[in-house]
Image (cartoon, rainbow, N blue to C red):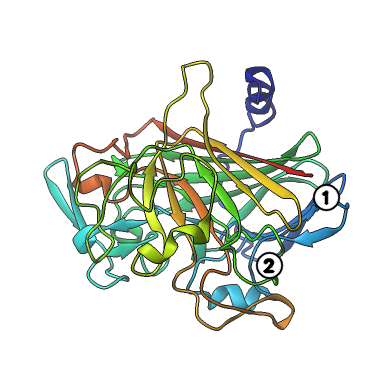
């Protein structure tokens, strides 16, 4: 991806997205179209509901897992398509210390906090700040001081936008208003390039442009180490089928990879390439974040999804670009702290092709 096209994306996304929260909390479904590409979203959780993408024969399929109704998203426990935060991933011990003060958070994952607590950003109604069907949609949310235990008021925005005919851009921003606070937003779509109702993703080939991981304990909390993937089942520096080495793990992949930095020629690093040989679909991902959680839907069990299809273990993969998990408790990890007046910025660029 050229620097010129990425710079143009920045210009197109320079919207005045921080606006006052709307009183109207109606939940709606919104659609964006560009050529054959169609995406549906809801302002409940700023969630991606579906994404139609052509295969090598031009046939369309929905490649993200999800539900038929918004009501089902309200009862969702696996974060299908949601924008998660205020801090995505896990915080060990459901607490952290900032500026000498300890903040205790809801423990919604054993003794730990996952994806912002019991009611994170994926479980709230967002305001629709800007919407054009052939262009973009911007959702905004104002998170109050002490919401789910986190300090300070935070103004949050996410923009979904088609660029050219085959790129989907996601821009996440958050402004700390009155207190320093950790921020780590993530887009939590579950991908199956054969189609959401086509079975497992073990035959998908994946390449991760990341030569290190942050190892975890048996509760999936980072130990603070950073280790090489070479010689381990986590090595996807060259394209490999996901199923080729998954059985060397306890249940599947659920780990943060340290994204390799480029040569300085771009603000974005290439994160991953995923390809399905049956449909010919290929997805490439770029981001400005230091990490990416690679998750193979290990915990999906008999989840009833769209069109009555039931999702099972390994039905999809997630690639959640992010700051490192539990960074608030590991000073050696890149900081997630945003101070008053600062703006957190997180960009993702997906490119879809088929051959």
Q: Nearer the viewer, mark 1 or mark 2?
A: 1
The residue wearing badge 2 is: 196
Q: Quadrant of residue 93?
A: bottom left
| Residue 280 drawn at (x, y percent) | 75, 51
| Residue 24 drawn at (x, y percent) | 64, 62
Res. 64 mark: none
* Residue occupying image coordinates x 65% and y 32%: 13
In-front residue for pair 107/306: 306
Q: Split into 4 quadrants, where in the image is the C terminus?
A: top right
In-front residue for pair 52/106: 52
For label 1, count other residues whose C-alpha is less than 10 Å away and answer few (under 14), some (14-19) or many (20+).
some
| Residue 173 drawn at (x, y percent) | 50, 39
Marks 1 and 2, the one that precedes in the sequence: 1
* Residue occupying image coordinates x 61% and y 64%: 25
Q: Up-down: is 160 above or below 345?
A: below
Say whether residue 157 is visible.
yes
The residue wearing badge 1 is: 56
Which element is circle 2 on? loop
Q: Quadrant of residue 94?
A: bottom left
In-front residue for pair 110/337: 110
Q: Split into 4 quadrants, where in the image is the N terminus?
A: top right
* Residue occupying image coordinates x 70% and y 72%: 197
Which element is circle 1 on? loop
In the rendered structure, the answer to whether residue 115 lies left or right of residue 5 reads left
Q: Up-down: is 247 above or below 1?
A: below
In the rendered structure, the answer to whether residue 332 lies left or right of residue 145 reads left
In the rendered structure, the answer to whether residue 84 lies left or right of residue 31 reads left
Say whether residue 87 is visible.
no
| Residue 14 drawn at (x, y percent) | 63, 28
């Amino acid at each position: 991806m050229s620097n010129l096209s990425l710079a143009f994306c920045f210009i197109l996304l320079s919207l005045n997205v921080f606006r006052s929260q709307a009183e109207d909390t109606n939940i709606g479904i919104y659609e964006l179209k560009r050529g054959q590409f169609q995406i549906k979203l809801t302002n409940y959780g700023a969630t991606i509901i579906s994404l139609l993408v052509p295969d090598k024969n031009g046939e369309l399929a929905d490649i993200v897992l999800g539900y038929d109704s918004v009501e089902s998203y309200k009862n969702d426990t696996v974060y299908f398509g949601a924008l998660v935060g205020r801090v995505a991933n896990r915080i060990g011990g459901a607490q952290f210390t900032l500026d000498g003060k300890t903040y205790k958070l809801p423990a919604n994952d054993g003794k730990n906090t996952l994806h912002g607590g019991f009611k994170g950003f994926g479980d709230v109604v967002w305001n629709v700040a800007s919407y054009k069907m052939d262009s973009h949609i911007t959702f905004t949310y104002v998170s109050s001081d002490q919401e789910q235990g986190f300090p300070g008021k935070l103004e949050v925005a996410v923009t979904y936008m088609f660029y050219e005919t085959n790129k989907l851009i996601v821009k996440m921003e958050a402004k700390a208003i009155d207190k320093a606070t950790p921020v780590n937003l993530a887009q939590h779509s579950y991908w199956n390039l054969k189609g959401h109702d086509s079975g497992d993703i073990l035959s998908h080939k994946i390449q991760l442009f990341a030569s290190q991981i942050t190892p975890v304990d048996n509760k999936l909390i980072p130990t603070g180490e950073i280790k090489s993937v070479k010689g381990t089942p986590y090595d996807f520096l060259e394209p490999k089928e996901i199923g080729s080495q998954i059985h060397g793990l306890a249940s599947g992949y659920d780990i943060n990879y340290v994204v390799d930095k480029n040569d300085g020629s771009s603000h974005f690093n290439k994160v991953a390439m995923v390809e399905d040989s049956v449909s010919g679909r290929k997805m490439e991902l770029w981001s400005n974040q230091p990490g990416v959680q690679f998750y193979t839907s290990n915990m999906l069990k008999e989840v009833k999804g769209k069109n009555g299809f039931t999702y099972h273990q390994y039905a999809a993969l997630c690639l959640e670009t992010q700051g490192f998990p539990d960074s608030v408790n590991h000073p050696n990890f890149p900081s997630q702290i945003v101070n008053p007046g600062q703006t957190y910025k997180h960009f993702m660029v997906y490119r879809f092709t088929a051959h």
